[in-house]
Image (spheres, rainbow, N blue to C red):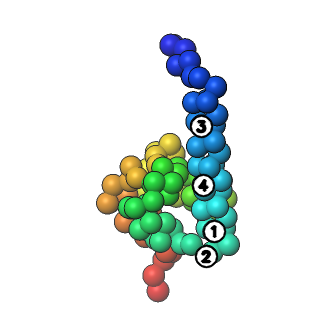
Amino acid sequence: MPSPPQLSPEARAAALEKAAIARRARAELKQQLRLGSLTFRELLGQAKTDEVAAKIKVLAVLESLPGLGKVKARRVLDEAGVSDTRRVQGLGEHQKAKLLDLLDGPKP
């Protein structure tokens, strides 16, 4: 495996800062999901224009939803036929529809 590129101290500091900003933004998104101020459907819409929302892993999103833990989130992904390493931007239309259907629950 090749070694990572050698960065100047300034470039390294800039990359570290960019990564920290992205981590904080992902944590904020997951917190909004936990609190219910953002729904999965809204996140899918937001991912069309927001790079942070687009690049977050679907598993992390599902685990952040109220009522879904690690086990149920993986079960939902399996049932929808979505890889647990898939990011929101990589979801196909059928996968999005299946996930939304599974998360909305049974219809009366």
Figure disc tally: 4
Label 3's element? helix
Disc 4/disc 2 C-alpha distance (Å): 15 Å
Lateral position of residue 25 relative to residue 58, left or right: right
Label 1's element? helix
Name the residue at 60% across, 55% down.
Answer: 26
Q: Amino acid at mark 1?
A: Gln
Name the residue at 60% across, 56% down.
Answer: 25
Name the residue at 41% across, 68% down.
Answer: 45
Q: Nearer the viewer, mark 1 or mark 3?
A: 3
Residue 13 seen by the camera: yes
* Residue 14, label in figure: 3
Name the residue at 46% across, 71% down.
Answer: 41
> Nearer the N terminus, badge 4 or badge 3?
3
Above or below — where is 86 with respect to 36? above
Label 4's element? helix
| Closer to the camera in the image, 62 or 35 | 35
Disc 1/disc 4 C-alpha distance (Å): 10 Å
Point out residue 19 in the picture as x, y percentages from the top left corner: 60, 42
* Residue 32, label in figure: 1
Where is mark 2, residue-wise? 37
Q: Amino acid at mark 2?
A: Ser
Where is mark 4, residue-wise? 26
